[in-house]
Amino acid sequence: MSQIFTPPTDPQAAIAAYRNLNLVGGAHVPVIRGLDVLNPATGAVLGQAAASGASEVDQAVKAAKAAGPLWAATPARARGKAVAAAGRALLEHFEIVAQVLARETGKAIRTECRGEVKTAADILEFYGGLGSELKGETIPFSPRMLTMTTREPLGVVAAIVPWNVPLVLMMLKIAPALVAGNTAVVKASEEAPFATYLAAEILMQYLPDGVLNVINGTGAECGAALTAHADVAKITFTGSEAVGETVYKAGAERIVPVSLELGGKSPMIVCEDASLEKAVAGAMSGMRFTRQGQSCTAASRIYVHESLYETFIAALRAELDQLVIGDPLDEATDIGTIINAKQAAVVAGYVAEAEATEGATVVRCGQPPVGMGLSPDLFAMPTLLLDLPEDHACVQDEIFGPVAVIQKWSDYDDVIARANDSRYGLAATVWTENLSRALDATSRLHAGYVQVNQNLTIQPNVSYGGFGRSGLGKEASLEAMLAHFTRSKTIVIAMD
């Protein structure tokens, strides 16, 4: 872009700056139609974002395609330096971006939003340092032939991001794509687009016009047009299982590569020798309660050995009761809101189904929020579901709310089988002081991301991705950049 962009210091001004427009070709491009974006905490209209259709999608893809040749020809280390510099700039402005993010997602500013922006910046810096790793190899095919492979960019990458952690998941897509020499069109989440726009405009100061473009609209109109566009060479999507199927089919129709990060129902196995204190802390962080449980990796199936079961539940409940549920912008708040009324109804429906199940127990924790102007309907209490059968919908389905199922176990082989009894396979954790058992469990659990005695979120340089219905491909690593954002070309040169 031709001039330095200085973000507004007022969050509402930053939101208003993106009213009914896209970021295309390094410029603000107005869009005729708009979508209201609500503040989940109050129910009030926060702002209006673009409602892009096929013509706006085409404009963005054309801008990305036009910028592609020059960007691909830029030395890889120079591309990396630009992406890393963009990450440092994002970090400099993390507070205003976090303030916008809290308003549109309903996530607490202190426990969630500031950390998300900082992690997003870290991802950019991490990938920025990997430009030198876009290497091919030489092959000893014949002494009289020079045989080698090279890595090339794919072209225009369509990156579709969700509302729960939009900035981190956007950076996991665009950072490796850009360093590898691709250009990108990001489809923001229509539920929470403004922080995506603001972060992208900060990044764009360090990139040639058209290398990064951001559009907004519904999945049915904007998303469908983007995944079907003839000039999109790669699709990377994070979101629901059902939409992932649609995206995968769109890619298959044009035979373009697709990577998917979808749902999860992650098991957490607490063994009899586990540290109770560590395990309870792991459940608190692993269930992502401060994110309202709106996480694909949430440890929402907790299997506790019978010798610790009652004590574990009591300790976990005591910790949850201390969390402050309230205004996401209040520095005292630990837990904010569910993203919208539709999702809140889904969460409430699952809890009601558990309550109607004979023999089951529903434990609600914490206190409803108290505050002027807050919309109580979207504040969900952390909830523990006990004594449900293994085939119950609450045990098998991704609820995507602050709801954890806690099950008792006594036989180790049986609990491994129960943990694996899921169509998902994103993440899992094991809590034990026995090294042999830890190694055995990590080898037997059907999940792409298995941890022992910890429950970390996505970390740069740690390969992340699931099995089964949790998706296809990996993120957050050099492996992911090479596998998903480059193509390998074999070159054979006769020496005679």
Image (spheres, helix red, strand yellow):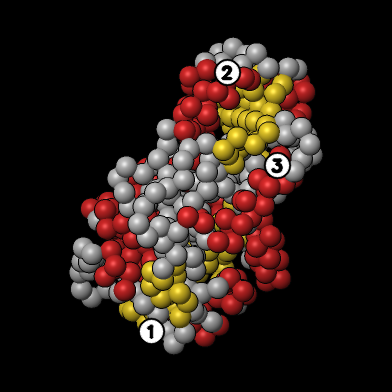
In screen coordinates, is 302 left or right of 169? right
Q: Nearer the viewer, residue 306 or 468?
A: 306
Q: Which residue is mark 1?
A: 30
Q: Quadrant of the C terminus?
A: bottom right
Tag 3 and tag 1, C-beta contact below 8 Å: no
Residue type marked 3: Glu
Choose mark 1 or mark 2, whichever is in front. 2
Image coordinates of residue 194 in percent, x first then y, are 38, 66
Q: Is residue 106 left or right of residue 237?
A: left
Which label belongs to residue 355? Answer: 3
Mark 2 residue crowding within 10 angstroms, few (<14) / some (14–19) / many (20+): few
Residue 122 in picture, x, y percent from top left: 35, 46
Q: What's the residue at 23%, 64% (across, down)?
A: 10
Q: Residue at x 33, y 69 (%)?
A: 15
Q: Tag 3, which secondary structure?
A: helix
Of labels 1 and 2, earlier in sequence is 1
Q: Which residue is depicted at the point 52% across and 85% down?
A: 55
* Relative vertical location of residue 6 with respect to residue 127 in this rendering, above or below: below
Q: Amino acid at mark 1?
A: Pro
Residue closer to the observer: 421 or 110: 110
Find the distance from the CA under tag 3 to the CA under tag 1. Answer: 49 Å
- Let me know if residue 206 appears in the view: no
Q: How far separated are the C-alphas under marks 3 and 2?
A: 23 Å
Dot label at residue 206: none
Q: Residues within 10 Å of mark 1 (few under 14, many from 20)?
A: some
Residue 200 lies, with reference to residue 116, above or below; the image says below
> Which quadrant of the figure contains the N terminus?
bottom left
The x and y percentages for residue 315 are 51, 23
Q: Secondary structure at mark 2?
A: helix
Which dot, 3 or 2, sits closer to the camera?
Answer: 3
Provide the residue designation for mark 2: 311
